[in-house]
Amino acid sequence: MIQENKNTESMEELFMTPRRSVVFIGSECYPFVKTGGLGDVMYALPRELAKQNCDVKVILPRYHCIPWEYQERMIYRGAFEMDLCADGRSFYVGIMEYVWDGVVYDFIDNDEFFGWGNPYTNLVDDIPKFCYFAKAALSALLYMDWIPNIIHCHDWQASLVPVYLRTLFENTELNSAKTILTIHNLRFQGIYNIPAIHYWSGLPDYVFNKDALKTGYEDANMMKGGLTYSNIITTVSGTYAGEIQTPYYGEGLDAHLRYHSGKLRGIVNGIDCGIWNPATDHLLYSTYDITNVLEKKRENKHGLQEELGLVQDDHKFVIGLVSRLTNQKGLDLLNAIIPEIMDEHTQLVVLGTGDDIYENSFRYYENAYKGNVCSNIMYDETRAHRIYAGADALLVPSQFEPCGLTQLIAMRYGTVPIVRETGGLRDTVEPYNMYYNTGNGFTFDNYDAGLLLDAINRAKTVYFTNRWCWDEMVQRDMDKDVSWESSARQYKDLYLELTW
Ligand code: ADP
Ligand code: GLC
């Protein structure tokens, strides 16, 4: 009861901070379209900011693949023609609006760019698509006469927004807004030859210089331009903010980021604790909270084993992996050691899609260890929830990880993370300490398969020989605050600092 009053009070306090208007511009947002964590953040952070006295709008492309249940609820807000290319070629911009839980979603409608395929196809098509999107987002704000205090852009797909704002839009009312560019993943930057980006963006020649868009001899880099022109750069954890200033993690932009380090901050992500709540999650076999997790997790494990055709045995140590199957995620390390982790006490459940090499190797292992390895090569939200609840441990051995959400979700579901100490994984998972009985998971530092195997073996040892300590860790994980509240407050403080 006391706790409840305290929370209500602190929410009231947050709502008393001065109001600011902010527009989020990005290329995906759950539940409309999601390919990874960016979609989760674009959903959860605006909603939390709305609770903290922000007036929030989210601008997204109206992709053809957005489910019909949302498309049919959108309302036509207007349309206009917009000049885009260097030769003045113009394009239709429609605005379809959807208001939901205090957040206004405006979808930019244009069939030529968004009417086919997946959100991301190939650079030849994606470069024009996101030049168009960035300019259309600003034009739509002017059309709707909605002048925000803050324009908050996400990843390379929205990186031209700050560049347009301070060039082609500098004489508009929008120029009073401050801009933030958040890097969710520096590996993707939107690089293409200068003539193509120059033509499609219609931006003035002078932005194609080495301090802004130009990179190498003949390429333009959209992310690099955005970093130059934005007022503040953020990324999704403190450790990643430091790492990207080094050549190993900097993806060729480390010098540029060091130069701009004065305006670079790291704010760690949270998760939406409404969607990810084992106590109310209707997708689970059995809901649970911290008081009955130990018993109910067994029921979820059993349900998962049955659903996936695995040997049904409570005593097995079930390791989960929910991930895009790409280089970033450290899957070469895992592939190298699967034969060594697959003893008669262990099961492995993989959920993901991505590069053929990983999809095929996980299929191979499913076949080689029938009944104990299950490779779900698919994208499936329901199955993800059931893995988070039914597994004992979740692997995230990433080569680099700006923040990572799967370890946060795992902890919320009482599933112990086994992670590499990089980026947000390092900032959110405290290594288990057997002497003090503290920590939230098992970690390893260097990118090395042997060290991953060692971390898994340490986890197994505690699980099988010291269950009491394991169970306490499960409860500590469930007790950890992984919500958006405090991180959203840091974004709100940043908005206030920029607009004071
Ligand atoms: P990234 O954004 O690099 O892919 P994150 O850990 O930030 O990694 O976010 C991944 C998000 O995508 C999580 O919400 C995770 O549950 C979800 N996810 C990843 N792969 C799948 C899949 N195959 N099926 C369902 N959800 C998935
Ligand atoms: C990116 C990163 C991931 C992060 C997510 C949301 O896709 O790879 O680490 O959690 O964005 O910020």
Image (spheres, rainbow, N blue to C red):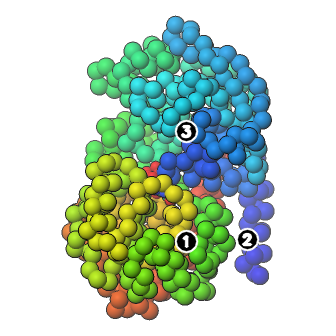
Q: Earlier in the sequence, mark 1 or mark 3?
A: 3
Please give the name of the residue rendered at 42% of the width and 73% of the height, measured from the top-left corner: 309
Q: Residue type at mark 3: give it.
A: Ser
Please give the name of the residue rendered at 50% of the width and 10% of the height, measured from the top-left corner: 86
* Direction from residue 351 to residue 365 in the image, left or right: left
Q: CA distance from mark 1 to mark 2?
A: 19 Å
Binning the other alpha carbons within 10 Å of mark 2 as few (below 14), some (14 to 19) or many (20 upward) gives: few
* Direction from residue 231 to residue 423 in the image, left or right: left
Q: Residue type at mark 2: give it.
A: Asn
Which of these two is toward me, 56 or 122?
Answer: 122
Where residue 436 appears, as percent x and y from the top left, is 40, 87
Q: Nearer the viewer, mark 1 or mark 2?
A: 1
Ligand 1 under 8 Å from disc 1 Cβ: no
Residue 7 circle label: 2
Quadrant into which the N terminus falls: bottom right
Residue 9 placement: quadrant: bottom right
Relative to 223, say whether 361 is above or below. Answer: below
**Residue named by callout 1:** 412
**Residue named by callout 3:** 27
* Direction from residue 82 to residue 215 in the image, left or right: left
Where residue 10 appears, as percent x and y from the top left, is 73, 66
- Labelled pair 1, 2 in contact (Cβ < 8 Å): no
Residue 308 in sight from this viewpoint:
yes
Relative to 54, say whether 445 is above or below. Answer: below
Residue 414 in sight from this viewpoint:
no
Which of these two is toward me, 210 or 465?
Answer: 465
Residue 95 circle label: none
Where disc 3 sits, the SS reads loop
Q: Residue type at mark 1: give it.
A: Arg
Please give the name of the residue rendered at 65% of the width and 19% of the height, measured from the top-left corner: 92
Ligand 1 under 8 Å from disc 2 Cβ: no
